[in-house]
């Protein structure tokens, strides 16, 4: 038995020679007094660090990611590139695509003046109920680690810092501010810490974000895990920023926690300076934190003489977004229905609310405002020949939550142009600022000079209803809202703030409405007065409000009947089902895996009326699909970014291969899923399942999922040759021939799983140790080599233990479709 003890590992540094960085930073620290140093440890606002003119340090801007960069403004007028969600990227199983993904995001960050992207998110898919499931990569730690390292490499090569998050075990949302995860050390090391370790040791990540939750009784911003393994074992020389408001005490300053956000204010202000002056905290501890922050400034070019990395040629963002979305789409059923043959189509019926309003992203802090999102309906209309008649039917309502006004039906009463007029007032009723807006969600996060002075606002628009009837109009946000309609007061209500999760208050607020009788095409003047209750602790002038409406609920049976009527005579029916950013969102977890509304009944009825029904699933995480075996094809498309509809059409018509394989197991029902507990008891959430999450747990319980980990179909056929395994000093090389025996070019993901049945310690029945992507023309054969590191076979026991003996390696196209076992002795 070989035990490797933890050791210091030097991290890769980018942005200048190590010695130059250290000399310049050390000299700068010597020019600062204690108050200057404390100033640097706190944000200067919601999204920026403090500047110090005396040393030429500019403020550094941090912005939410990872699938788009919002910048300091949460504003539809400051559009961002929106790429597919992280689970979609993981479904590509392509680290080169992940590197390119990071580079494209970084270019948009540079365009917006952003220095630090708050991503990637590497929570594991422990439970399918997790609210931010879509924002993370996979249920497997190796796949997550590979993709995270590649993404970070792409980001930081462009001179922008990646902030891997959230360290650690922030795998669900329920009560996350007070959540205490109880997890064994071995499980922590082998599963949850692995992506962070690889990000530090291999990708040289510049920033780590510490989480809200506690692990084994200690809040992460005060947890010894910040010191070891992060600093002492892995050699992390970057900066640790706490998740927003996660730094809550002076105690956290004693640990390797370097920046408290947002600011100014909070526990690291004058109280921390006083603690240093009293001798309670050594000034050397403060100096280390300042050194980390200044080192980051060197790397992103925020200090004199350190210009940002020049931006050489880079990919076009929308073009890449379209490609990346297609690469992640997973075909899980195909009864010769796909790819479509346009010359055989005269009439196509497209069904579903998600077909008309494609969902490009989930909800929460990762939200950005793209310039557009191409819907499935728009994508198909653009791709199919003009001679093909395309008929749209709603079929089922999927969103029942309060929503924004339709921006296409708003006119600014002051200018007559599209949009609305927004005015901010101070406590004395003076106008602070006036602006034209084009959406009815207003978010302030203390990011403007006058934000802290905002006492009230007015929002005015001329709204033209699409249909006659009763319109439920109101507002959603903690605060007081008053509404006048055509000058007549119609609403005056106050909503109290909700719960302890402030982000939940932003993205799942309570709402109040009033009923208006409207006539289609006849405009009405909506005038709102709003006074916000502060939502985010420590950020003056922060609030979020939606001026909008509660959708009316049409008769479900009538909608399904209408869809069935349209489907009967169609050559093809494309039903787009899914979730949305209200259901999958930061701040809360899901309670079930059912599709919202009556979508299951819709699919069943349409498929019974027309067997040539293709179902597209527009969801960021697993959902139950009870009709999956009764339709002609099922394509899982995740949250596909702004080019979603175009990418979908590319795949449906066969212009692009559906390149995805499942990065997470899809259960038949929630009751089948082996790990579902996301709700703490008395503040504690035990990870009792230990090593057995995802496909590892499915193997343990012996149940069949709907679709296994690694599974996915393409438009061609493959044959894998027998593998050959050669053990070397650093690991095992697995070599095999991969033949495209079909009639089209295609992509295959070959996976390698290990098994050790006679191990002296508990292990999964089978676990992923390597994989490779093959792209081949029809009739061609490629020889694939997959390198498996020795570490993939080790387990943690106060050090990495390499158990000698024989291992079985299986190759195949999913965890369930493996064969050709080969023995290797280590």
Image: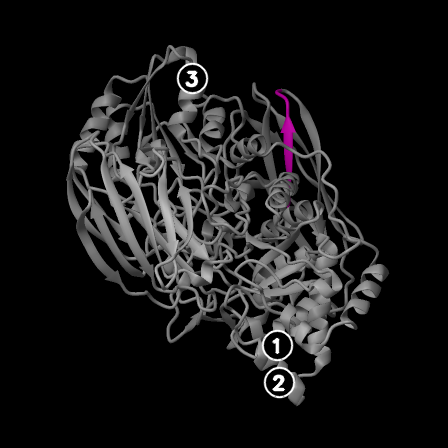
Marked residue nearer the N-terminal end (2 or 3): 2
> Label 2 near label 1: C-beta < 8 Å?
yes
- Which of the 4 image quarters holds residue 289? bottom right
x, y percent for residue 457: 35, 54
Q: In the figure, 281 relative to 447: above or below?
A: below
Residue 642 image offset from top left, x and y in percent: 48, 35
User: For the point 62% across and 40% down, which residue is it?
Assistant: 104
Picture disc at residue 253: 1
The label on residue 275 is: 2
The image shows a total of numbered marks equal to 3
C-alpha span from label 1 to label 3: 60 Å
Residue 774 covered by magenta stretch: yes
> If you read the primary sequence from the N terminus, does the residue marked by circle 1 or circle 3 appear first?
1
Position in image of residue 14 (x %, y %): 76, 53
* Residue 559 visible in the current orientation: yes
Closer mark to the observer between disc 1 and disc 3? 1
Report the Cα–Cα distance between label 2 and label 3: 69 Å
Instruction: Out of 336 and 641, give the one closest to the viewer.
Output: 641
Q: Residues within 10 Å of mark 2 (few under 14, many from 20)?
A: some
Q: Secondary structure at mark 3?
A: loop
From the viewer's perspective, is the residue at label 2 or at label 3 nearer?
2
**10 Å crowding of disc 1: few (<14), some (14-19), many (20+):** many
In the rendered structure, find residue 384 and report the number of the disc placed on it.
3
Position of residue 52 in the picture relative to residue 559 (left or right): right
The magenta stretch spans which residues? 770-778
């Amino acid at each position: 038995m070989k035990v490797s003890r933890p050791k210091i590992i030097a991290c890769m540094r980018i942005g200048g020679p190590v010695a130059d960085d250290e000399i310049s930073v050390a000299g700068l620290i010597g020019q600062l007094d204690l108050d200057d140093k404390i100033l640097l440890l706190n944000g200067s606002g919601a999204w920026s660090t403090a500047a110090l003119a005396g040393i030429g340090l500019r403020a550094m801007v941090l912005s939410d990611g990872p699938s788009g960069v919002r910048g300091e403004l949460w504003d539809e007028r400051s559009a961002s590139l929106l790429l597919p969600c992280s689970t979609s990227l993981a479904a590509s199983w392509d680290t080169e695509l992940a590197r390119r993904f990071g580079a494209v995001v970084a270019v948009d960050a540079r365009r917006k003046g952003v220095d630090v992207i708050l991503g990637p998110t590497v929570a594991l898919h422990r439970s399918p109920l997790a609210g931010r499931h879509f924002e993370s990569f996979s249920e497997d730690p190796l796949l997550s680690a590979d993709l995270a390292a590649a993404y970070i490499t792409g980001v930081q090569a462009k001179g922008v810092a990646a902030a891997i998050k959230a360290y650690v075990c922030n795998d669900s949302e329920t009560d996350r501010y007070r959540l205490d995860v109880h997890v064994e050390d071995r499980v922590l090391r082998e599963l949850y810490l692995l992506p962070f370790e690889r990000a530090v040791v291999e990708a040289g990540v510049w920033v780590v974000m510490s989480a809200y939750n506690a692990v084994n009784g200690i809040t992460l911003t005060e947890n010894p895990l910040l010191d070891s393994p992060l600093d002492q074992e892995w050699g992390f020389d970057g900066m640790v920023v706490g998740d927003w408001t996660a730094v809550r005490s002076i105690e956290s300053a004693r640990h390797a926690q370097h920046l408290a956000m947002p600011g100014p204010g909070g526990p690291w202000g004058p109280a921390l300076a006083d603690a240093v002056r009293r001798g309670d905290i050594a000034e050397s501890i403060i100096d280390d934190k300042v050194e980390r922050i200044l080192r980051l400034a060197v790397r992103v070019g925020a200090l004199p003489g350190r210009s940002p990395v020049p931006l050489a040629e880079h990919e076009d963002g929308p073009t890449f977004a379209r490609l990346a979305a297609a690469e992640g789409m997973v075909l899980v059923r195909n009864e010769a229905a796909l790819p479509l043959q346009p010359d055989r189509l005269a009439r196509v019926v497209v069904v579903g609310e998600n077909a008309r309003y494609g969902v490009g992203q989930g909800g929460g802090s990762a939200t950005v405002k793209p310039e557009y999102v191409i819907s499935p309906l728009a994508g198909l209309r653009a791709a199919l020949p003009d001679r093909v008649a395309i008929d749209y039917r709603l079929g089922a309502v999927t969103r029942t939550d309060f929503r924004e006004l339709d921006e296409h039906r708003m006119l600014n009463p002051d200018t007559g142009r599209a949009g609305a007029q927004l005015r901010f007032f101070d406590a004395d009723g003076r106008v602070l600022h006036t602006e034209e807006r084009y959406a009815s969600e207003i978010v302030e996060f203390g990011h403007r000079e006058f934000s802290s002075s905002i006492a009230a606002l007015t929002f005015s628009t001329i709204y033209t209803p699409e249909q006659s009837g009763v319109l439920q109009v109101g507002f959603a946000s903690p605060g007081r809202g008053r509404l006048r309609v055509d000058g007549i007061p119609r609403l005056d209500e106050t909503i109290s703030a909700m719960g302890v999760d402030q982000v939940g208050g932003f993205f799942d607020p309570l709402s109040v409405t009033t009923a208006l009788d409207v006539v289609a095409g006849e405009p009405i003047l909506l005038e709102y007065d709003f006074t916000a209750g502060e939502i985010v602790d420590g950020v003056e002038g922060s609030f979020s409000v939606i001026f909008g409406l509660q959708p009316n609920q049409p008769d479900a049976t009538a909608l399904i009947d209408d869809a069935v009527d349209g489907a009967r005579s169609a050559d093809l029916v494309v039903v787009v089902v899914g979730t949305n950013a209200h259901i999958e969102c930061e701040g809360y977890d899901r309670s079930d895996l059912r599709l919202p509304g009556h979508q299951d009944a819709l699919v069943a009825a349409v498929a019974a009326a027309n067997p040539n029904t293709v179902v597209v699933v527009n969801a960021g995480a697993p959902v139950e699909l009870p009709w999956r075996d009764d339709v002609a094809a099922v394509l899982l498309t995740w949250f596909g970014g702004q080019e979603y509809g175009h990418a979908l059409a590319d795949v449906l018509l066969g212009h692009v291969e559906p390149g995805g394989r499942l990065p997470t197991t899809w259960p038949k029902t929630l009751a089948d899923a082996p790990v579902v507990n996301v709700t703490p008891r008395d503040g504690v959430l035990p990870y009792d399942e230990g090593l057995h999450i995802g496909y590892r747990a499915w193997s343990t319980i012996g149940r069949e999922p709907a679709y296994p980990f690694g599974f996915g179909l393409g438009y061609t056929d493959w044959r894998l040759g027998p593998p050959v395994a050669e053990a070397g000093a650093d690991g095992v090389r697995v070599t095999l021939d991969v033949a495209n025996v079909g009639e089209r070019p295609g992509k295959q993901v070959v996976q390698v799983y290990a098994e050790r049945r006679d191990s002296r310690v508990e292990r999964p029945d089978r676990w992923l140790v390597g994989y490779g992507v093959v792209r081949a023309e029809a009739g061609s054969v490629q020889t694939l080599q997959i390198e498996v590191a020795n570490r993939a076979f080790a387990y943690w026991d106060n050090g990495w233990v390499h158990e000698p003996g024989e291992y079985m390696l299986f190759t195949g196209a999913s965890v369930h479709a493996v064969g050709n076992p080969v023995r290797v002795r280590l």
